[in-house]
Image: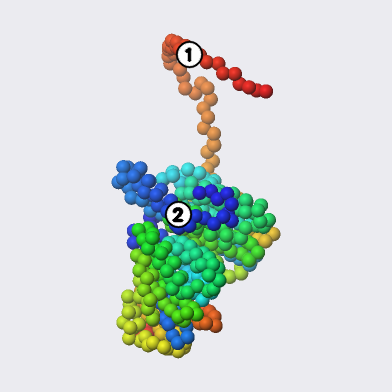
Amino acid sequence: MALSNVLQIPTSGFNFENVAINVALESLLEGGHTKTPKPMKTGTTIAGLVCKEGVVLGADTRATSGEVVADKMCAKIHYISPNIYCCGAGTAADTEKTTDLLSSNLTIFSMNSGRNPRVVMAVNILQDMLFRCTGASLILGGVDCNGNHLYTVGPYGSIDNVPYLAMGSGDLAALGILEDRFKPNMEMEEAKELVRDAIHSGIMSDLDSGNNIDICVITKQGVDYIRPYQESEYKDKRQKRYKYGPGTTSILTEKIVPLDLEVVQETVQRMDTA
Amino acid sequence: MERHLMDSKIKGVSTGTTILAVTFNGGVIIGSDSRASIGGYYVSSKTINKLIQVHDRIFCCIAGSLADAQAVTKAAKFQISFHSIQMESPPLVKAAASVLKELCYNNKEELQAGFITAGWDRKKGPQVYTVALGGMLLSQPFTIGGSGSTYIYGYADAKYKPDMSKEECLQFATNALALAMGRDNVSGGVAHLVVITEEGVEHVVIPGDKLPKFHDE
């Protein structure tokens, strides 16, 4: 459902496409024995807060696949527009593709209207896209002509405008830190430290969050995407290349069997490379 | 460890809630709490807005699944606005309630949201309409809804009087919300009240600690 022109009024009525997807998934997975995937807060801690000069977003960088860490340096803070960034928790496919789609549509809008998109517009389009989608929970933050904004898009597509927020499997730990130390109109350095501490708490208390901490600071002047803001103390010292040179495995015997292939049909098609 | 959200009847964020609307002499007061929960055990927001303005003098408050309710009110806001432009006059409260009812009834299998619509119009003055889960539309002088409403049916029935003054009505609504929030675990936060009259719309917010107390301490 790509919108070629976001100013177009979407088709009337409700779009229950995602419900159909859930039903299809149910029948595909183990022949109908599994229920619709419940919204899972899969391995992530993301947090955001509004401060005096702008918005600070933070995320860990661990992507898990079951019990294995699939990506140690995954980027969870996605670009939406020059003044809006979005942290995503949940199914990586859902969060990445949705934010990509949103970003493209808003770029077209910017070209058509000649202005940067407003955060409230981005969040409304997200809500329409993610209605009834269980896979993604997003924190959208940005600065526009109306001020500094932070929005959450929850499971099933509900939105809320909040001053501070944490989501993902490590959200309760991070929220504890935010609830304790958040004050309205904080200074930038204090805000960055608070988000760092919140993500750090999520990393420490949740097995599925970990590795490094990314911070993204959005102000009227511009965006500072600090990746990584803080590296994990537990860096592996193993080699990153597992290439075995020729001769590692010794050859004991060698047997060559020629395959008799008959040419049945040969066609030659000339390519016009004019 | 992956955590699944508990198998609650409402999928996703729910506005397990207390909402009410009461007519008085010259206007109508619509009110709600401000708590949103997930799975009946986690408060996902202490300050959620459940009073949505669908037109200049018409508000509606939402109960049930937050995602469904927001989607319905978005569509309803657009349709009511369009209707009002076509008619070249402010919409009737009944028209706004009907729009919500059509959306709820036609999608009743999938949606889990209920509404109370209240407002003022030229034709009939202050009115209150309930749009229930399956799409039933009912007009009443006052109505309560949401999970917290079960605790205050007695209070509301006993204390409501037709043709109250604005102050009496405010007191009635505040007391009702306070009593419900005191007993229902998924209602809480602050009390939002909106007073709608011919002159305009007035928003009153009462923080949790300023709510009236009933033998609490």
Dividing the picture into quadrants, the one containing residue B165 is: bottom left
Three-letter residue code for mark 1: Gln
Q: What element carries label 2?
A: loop
Does any portion of residue A164 appear in the rendered image? Answer: yes
Badge 1 and badge 2 in a common chain:
yes
| Residue B16: % across, % down | 38, 68
Q: Residue at x 63, y 22 (%)?
A: A272
| Residue A79: % across, % down | 59, 51
Q: Which residue is drawn at 43% across and 82% down?
A: B23
Residue that mark 1 sits on: A265
Side (left or right) of A184 relative to B99: right
Q: Which residue is drawn at 32% across and 47% down?
A: A34
Q: What element carries label 1?
A: loop
Point out which mark residue A15 bears. Answer: 2
Q: Which residue is drawn at 52% across and 15% down?
A: A267
Decide which of B24, B9 is in the foreground and name it.
Answer: B24
Does any portion of residue B187 appear in the rendered image? Answer: no
Q: Which chain is home to disc 1?
A: A
Q: For the residue carrying disc 1, how many other residues have a C-alpha within 10 Å: few (<14), some (14-19), or many (20+)?
A: few
- The numbered mark, 1 or 2, whose residue comes first in the sequence reads 2
Point out which mark residue A217 bears. Answer: none
Q: For the residue carrying disc 2, how many other residues have a C-alpha within 10 Å: few (<14), some (14-19), or many (20+)?
A: some
**Gap between marks 1 and 2, in whole Å?**
52 Å
Three-letter residue code for mark 2: Asn
> Against A68, is B120 above or below?
below
| Residue A191: % across, % down | 60, 63
| Residue B120: % across, % down | 48, 79
Spot the residue most to the left: A33
Side (left or right) of A223 relative to B163: right
Spot the residue most to the front: B87
Verify CB contact (< 8 Å) between mark 1 and mark 2.
Answer: no
Quarter containing the C terminus of chain A? top right
